[in-house]
Image (cartoon, rainbow, N blue to C red):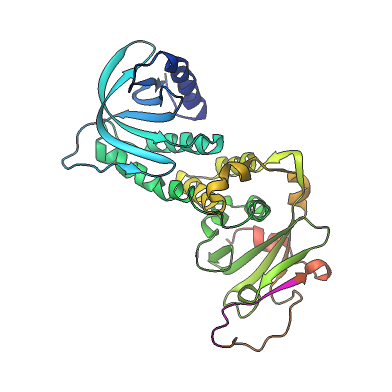
Amino acid sequence: MDYEINRDSIRSALAEASSLSGELEEGSLAVSPISGFADYMVAVTQSGGLAIAIATTASPYSTPDVRLATLSAHYGVSCRLRSSHSARTARVSLIYCLSSDSEVRTIFLDFAINLFYGLPDKPSDNDVAAGVDQWLRLFRKLDSIPRSGVVGLIGELVVIEAGDSLDRWVRAWHLNSNDAIDFTFERPQLEVEVKSTQGARRVHKVSANQAYDRIMDSFFASVVVDLRTNGTSVGDFARSIADSLSDEESRLLLWTTIAGVCGKRLQEYLSVCFSKESTMSSLSFYRSDQIPKPSLDLPMPQGVLDLHFTSDFSGCLPVDRGRLCTSPD
């Protein structure tokens, strides 16, 4: 019989481990192995905390532990494990989810799937540490200040969803964290800045750095976000995009960027609901040199880093969506 590590098998193991947590001794963990993978376990603490436990061998050199606000990792420790069949002391590497937020725990379980699949047979402490290291940037961002509002996040996810190659758009998303542009493509050289609004008209705040003297072919994407309490949650929308990506690298990049946008407010942002149909249908693209903007004497004076103005895109002629949403040959 072929076994697979996926959300269903992970959640099944979590449910079984959770049912045992009330019987734990102090300092022990309730565990349930993933079906077909005896050394990979979902674990629950006495207080209901979430963790994963992996049977590991010692590495030639010591592996330092990791402690973040939302995640901690401890390698090659002796731990008392209780399963539905036995109680034993084993040498394991433990990774704890330190957040009680449901969305962070969901990301943690997706991280576990990725980690389990990337490990060799009979993994060492260092093998597990290398897998954890790939995700540390994401979990660090979950303790940061949000970079923008949820309406802006919805707009950017809508632009990704509209593309015929989701992986291409995800790889271009905040490619340069220091730039003022949301999507930057290298082949062909193209950039797209997303502007989102809840208003009836396409009125957006624009910075001079976004609207003037761009080196690449530059466009604005305008999205009218229709928030609805009975609509699609941002979390479900993001997960549908993640599930459509072609590889784990793209999925990790997607969630890392989302974590950077949401920061500490991930749970709040991902629980917001909107009308996917009306919001998706509102997407329009405009050339950056065609939007209403004031005449500026460029370059700006020394010491002036940027200027902002409000522009009404409603009277502008949009460009063909297919030109921007379709991957080049």
User: Which residue corresponds to the image point at 63% horizontal and 72% vertical from the top-left?
Assistant: 218
Q: Residue at x 41, y 46 (%)?
A: 135
**Is residue 18 found left or right of 151 in the rendered image?**
left
Name the foreground residue: 192 vs 168. Answer: 192
Q: Which residues are magenta?
A: 302-310
Dominant secondary structure of the residues highlighted in magenta in the image: loop
* Quarter of the image that includes the N terminus: top left
Residue 33 sits in quarter: top left
Magenta region includes residue 303: yes
**89 in relation to 171, above or below:** above
Q: Which quarter of the rendered picture does the C terminus lie within? A: bottom right
Depth check: 292 or 24 in front? Answer: 24
Within the magenta stretch, is there residue 67? no
Q: In the image, is residue 158 above or below residue 284? A: above
Residue 111, position as x, y percentages in the image = 44, 38
Task: Determine the image quadrant of residue 305.
Answer: bottom right
Q: Nearer the viewer, residue 321 or 272?
A: 272
| Residue, far front | 26
Place of residue 117 in the rendered image (x, y in percent of width and height, measured from the top left): 39, 35
Give residue 120's position: percent from left, percent from top: 30, 35
Q: Residue 43 appears at what percent x and percent y? A: 40, 25
The residue depicted at 56 percent of the width and 57 percent of the height is 147
In the rendered view, tell whether residue 56 sits above or below residue 271: above
Q: Is residue 64 left or right of residue 234?
A: left
